Image (cartoon, helix red, strand yellow):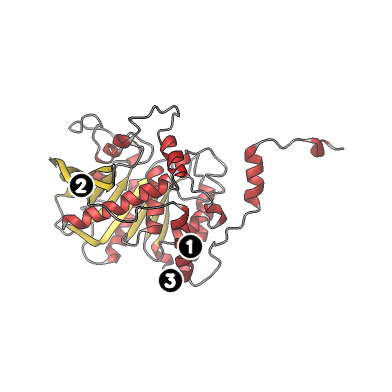
Amino acid sequence: MSAAETRLHLSPSEFHRHLLERTVPKLRYEGDEVAAWQRRLRTRLCRLIGEWPARRVPLRSRRLWLRPHPLGTIEKVVFTAEPHCEVPAYVCLPAGAEPPYTFMICLQGHSTGMHVSIGAQREDETKPYTAPGDRDFAIGCMQREIAALCIEQRSLGERREQRQQALSPHGCHDATVQALMLGRTLIGERVYDVDRGIDYLASRGDADMNRLGVMGNSGGGTTALFAAALLKRLAFAMPSCYFCTFADSLMSIYHCADNYVPGLLQWAEMADVMGLFAPRPVVLVAGAEDPIFPIAGARKAYRQLQRIYRAAGAVDRCHLVVGQGGHRFYAEDAWPVMLEELARLGGKKGRGRN
């Protein structure tokens, strides 16, 4: 008997890789009529990400503070997503624009929280904070005369676990596994918060509801991508440092549990999920040296996404921007492309520096 025949296969990842190589997603895009394919996959994806509340509770939004900023004003608010679940957020209005505003919903990933988006310290929001990797998303928006709604994601920042002792070094872990036990996913809950954020913007009266977008990096990019796939009120999207193939990222490299949707690979790859956004404009941002979402996998997924957008008659609305660095946002590379897309949408557009 040869050494190969006697070698024991004991590693779980080896077994799962074996399954992965034999898995053909049942609803991957194969040249079907795009709208009909999107309806089938979106219906399936809604089931996979878990249950949402049967009815929407009142937002009960309220202001916590309002402060001037050199670029306009920043208001801190809180609104109710579902019972016993409130969402802190910043509303950032640029001085150089007038309502109704183009709004970008901004989502931080595994950082210390949404305060990074406004370049302020978490414990004292009156003090400045230098955001690494261009993650001060709201400042970037205001500089370009775009308003921002910065949502605190579940299990991060001010919404980190504060009651139950967390033994995992990753603050998202307990929330993820508890959601699974309840027939939910943390991704689904975070997307629902974005949807409720859109409800909040509608209630304000100063948002152009035809010009709402979503952006985020890493864990924020994850939510941005799934929100784009599922929320029809979003008109443009800019996910950063998440878009890749599942096979080359989540299935090959260690990631936090909140990245995973049970059973998803049985039905779709990541390009298929992003393809649910077609023909609306998307700017995907990647790092050439990102160690956890490898650029080769991102380019492979992008080729498949282009196929979907081409079939939808919108291949020119689908962009991949690659920054020459690691796992971060690349404002100077990404924003010029997004501003061109905003100009094409018609109506008011963001201006300012690229």
Say whether marks 3 and 2 touch (CB < 8 Å): no
Taking the image as shown, residue 149 lies to the left or right of residue 72, namely: right
Q: Position of residue 273 (x, y in %)?
A: 46, 57
Residue for point 53% across, 64% down? 29
Tell which circle, 2 or 1, labels the residue nearer the N-terminal end: 1
What residue would you read off at disc 3?
Answer: 313
Q: In this rendering, is residue 233 above or below 33?
A: above
Q: Callout 1: few (<14), some (14-19), or many (20+) C-alpha neighbours within 10 Å? A: many
Q: In this rendering, is residue 115 above or below 142?
A: above
Instruction: Look at label 3 and name its amino acid.
Output: Gly
Q: Which mark is residue 91?
A: 2
Q: Which mark is residue 292?
A: none
User: Toward which corner of the image does residue 71 lie, by quadrant?
Assistant: top left
Q: Position of residue 159 (x, y in %)?
A: 31, 37
Q: Secondary structure at mark 1?
A: helix
Q: Callout 3: few (<14), some (14-19), or many (20+) C-alpha neighbours within 10 Å? A: few
- In terms of depth relative to the viewer, which is nearer, 352 or 234? 234
**Which of labels 2 and 1 is toward the front?**
1
**Which of labels 3 and 2 is toward the front?**
2
Q: In this rendering, is residue 191 above or below 174?
A: below
Q: Position of residue 308 (x, y in %)?
A: 48, 65
Instruction: Look at label 1 and name its amino acid.
Output: Leu
Instruction: Look at label 2 and name its amino acid.
Output: Val
What residue would you read off at disc 1?
Answer: 41
- In terms of depth relative to the viewer, which is nearer, 37 or 133? 37
Give the Cα distance between marks 2 and 1.
33 Å
